Image (cartoon, rainbow, N blue to C red):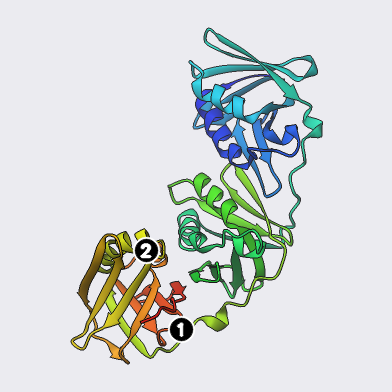
Amino acid sequence: MKITLLRSALNEAVGQVSKAVSPRPPIPILGGIKLEADSSGMSLTASDTDISIRSFIPAVLDDQVAVNVERAGSVVLQAKFFAEIVRKLPTEEIHLEVHDRFQATIVSGATEIQLVGFDPEEFPVLPSVREDRVFSLPGSLLKDMIRQTSFAISTNESTPILTGVHWQLQDGTLRATATDRHRLASSVAQTGADPSVQFSDVVISGRTLNELVKIIPDQDAVVDVVVDDSQVLFRLDNVLFFARVLDGAYPDTSRIIPRTFKTEFTLPAAAFADAIERAYLLSREEKTNIVRLSTLEDGRIELNSSSSEIGRVTETLQTSSGITGEPLRISFNSKYFIDALRVIEADEIFLGFNGPMSPVVLRPRDGEDNLHLILPYRTSG
């Protein structure tokens, strides 16, 4: 292989595929990036057991020659060193040549670097996916759905299925759900997909989805999603992102989301979030994060938390709607509330309760597309 290419294009592609490189690969070649060049341009591929990413640099990019291939070929180079080298090369024009036994030479300006490569034939092939179930949605919407749910996954590897986000598509409605058994986050979007395209059993690792978010461009690009039994392919511009589907059955969470409430009210989102943050400052010192909420008779609520070594926080908030239903005193993990409030994009927050020992529901006042459920604490007194 002998090519000349632009450092900026190569640096972007390396940054994209590096997200699929394991920091501790089970075999050395999986710590590398596979480079393949032909007359159409150059592709870079990286893979671990959960993620495979391919990024393609076309020969002509934005009316500029990005890759000039003098001799086609392929090689696998160690990702860690290759990525750092590309980032620090002194000139925009890079010359890359692969010699016998996969020894690679990189020349940029007055800099020449020799790298030991691997045989590309030993690199794993990309997963194969059937294109029976395909739909598209804006990249910004996909990023929002991941951001609104992935924080609620479990970090306990003893229940691997809960370390992922559960995806369902029925009648064009896409639903993402995550739970760690103490809280639940759900996000819903309309895709416009053909009703024949549907699935209900796709679970993707939260870590994988957070890596996907990093390569979806900020501009509103369209992402094609291809769903197969064991892999999901996210296809955008010149990038293919393959995500492994987690094995196992995800619990049926629809049964635990209440639709009616014994106590409910709405609050200004910003004021409520600030009050919870202040209460959290003391509750975290006790390593419990417990904050207590009580309804008052005049349409206000009271929040309080305490630390035996620091003191006590008490403050009241006026509800926007007044309080409907029964009086309430409840204790909850303030960190869970903070996490939910950070991703709810609304001026007003609806809260619904069914007593001090039943799950709390938070959502925007005017919709249920973004819903959060949090289990309360049982406390003495």
Q: Residue at x 56, y 39 (%)?
A: 16
Q: Position of residue 8 (x, y in %)?
A: 50, 27
Q: Residue at x 74, y 44 (%)?
A: 126
The residue identified by callout 1 is 358
For the residue carrying disc 2, how many other residues have a C-alpha within 10 Å: few (<14), some (14-19), or many (20+)?
A: some
Q: Position of residue 158 (x, y in %)?
A: 66, 62
Q: Is residue 316 left or right of residue 143?
A: left
For marks 1 and 2, give the CA distance.
Answer: 19 Å
Three-letter residue code for mark 2: Ile
- The mark that comes first in sequence, 1 or 2, is 2
* 91 over 215 or under it: above or below: above
**93 and 269: which one is in front?**
269
- Quarter of the image for residue 1 reads top right
Q: Is residue 139 left or right of residue 232?
A: left
Q: Residue furthest top?
A: 110
* 260 over 232 or under it: above or below: below
* 323 over 85 or under it: above or below: below
Q: Is residue 249 left or right of residue 359?
A: right
The numbered dot on residue 71 is none
Q: Position of residue 111 (x, y in %)?
A: 55, 10
Q: Residue furthest left?
A: 298
Which structural element holds mark 2?
Answer: helix
The numbered dot on residue 338 is 2
